[in-house]
Image: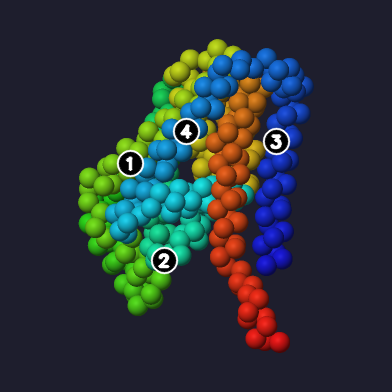
Amino acid sequence: MRTHRWLHWLKLLIGLGLIGWLYLEIDRRESVWQVLMSIRPDYLLLSGLLLVPNLLLAYGKWRYLLSRRFQNITFGEAWGSLLLGYALGVITPGRLGELGRALYFEERDKMAVTGLNLLDKAANQMVFFTLGVIACLVLILRGKLWSLPQALPVLIPGGLLLALLWTMLFNPRRSRWWLYRLTRRWRHLPWLRSLLSAYQGLAPRDTVFIAALSLAWILVIVLQYHLLMQAFTDVSPVASFLAVTAALFVKTLLPLTFGDLGIREGTLVFFYALFQVSPAAVLNASLIIFLINFCLPALAGLYYLWQVRLRREPAAPSTEEMLEIE
């Protein structure tokens, strides 16, 4: 337990160290603070308001998944577990803590909820990966990254893997069959049966709808980044789309720090630099996005985390029980 705690602190320090290093490197060429003071409030407000559709899309997808497996899912269950996931995810590398949404449920099969949570995250990651690979390929063809022959050893296996994953996503029955085949040795374990039960009843139209919601959610995030970049400097929508999707793809491959702090900012600075965009503007925009999209929902999620902790604490004896004990 102590080693685990030190590992968490180490990842937090690495993230803060990366932010500090980026700040010092960029500030030597242009003042990060002066660029921040030049922000246009209207674009900042628009980007902040997009948190509403961002959360609504995430909520809609999560509730849809829950309703495929459970009956009578309430708004409170779906919304509370979603925000609890934000609270847990902001302090874990790659936001893996989001897989703790099942903790919010009292009367549902927690392993089945975790299975749905895995499917939710997998759909997001597949869209991230697909858009990121496309963005990197476009940047390569435009001569902004490596040459095509250098990139082919990575692009070909990556493209084949993505094709396989999308085929599995759009064929849930076949995917279930493979999952059961791969896990038949351990199928007697109750938790594994519960986990796999999350995928029962899913039809191709369900997975297509889930992927569409994931795509819409990610496009909202890209738009938020673009609006915040516009708050500091002029950037074309195409440049923002390519830089943000490529950066978020690479960032996902490097889950080294809490909330991806430092990794996200560094990759965004790198890819926006391919379009001669101010690194100070990118650093400021990325940190503001972190506050809007991660810290604000995580703060709201602390309420639901507190609720979960209250449920787990042993109830205090009533006055009558105390008198009986005496």
Lower position in the chain sequence, tag 3 or tag 1: 3
Specify few, some or many for label 4: CA neighbours under 10 Å numbering under 14, 14-19, or 20 or more. Answer: few
Q: Looking at numbered disc 2 in the image, what kind of residue is underneath it?
A: Glu
Q: Looking at numbered disc 4 in the image, what kind of residue is underneath it?
A: Val
Q: Distance from label 3 to label 4 (Cα)?
A: 27 Å
Q: Distance from label 4 to label 2 (Cα)?
A: 29 Å
Q: Quadrant of residue 309?
A: bottom right
Q: Residue at x 77, y 22 (%)?
A: 28
Are discs 2 and 1 less than 8 Å apart at CB? no
Lower position in the chain sequence, tag 3 or tag 2: 3
The residue beneath circle 1 is: 211
The residue beneath circle 4 is: 52
Lower position in the chain sequence, tag 4 or tag 2: 4
Pinpoint residue 290: horizontal percent, then vertical percent.
60, 35
Classify mark 3: helix, strand or loop: helix
Classify mark 4: helix, strand or loop: helix
Are discs 4 and 2 less than 8 Å apart at CB? no
Q: Distance from label 3 to label 1 (Cα)?
A: 33 Å
Q: Residue at x 58, y 55 (%)?
A: 305
Give residue 107's mark. Answer: 2
142 and 222: which is toward the camera: 222
Q: How is the image coloured?
A: rainbow
The residue beneath circle 3 is: 19
Lower position in the chain sequence, tag 1 or tag 4: 4
Specify few, some or many for label 3: CA neighbours under 10 Å numbering under 14, 14-19, or 20 or more. Answer: many
Q: Looking at numbered disc 3 in the image, what kind of residue is underneath it?
A: Ile
Q: Distance from label 2 to label 1 (Cα)?
A: 28 Å
Q: Nearer the viewer, mark 1 or mark 4?
A: 4
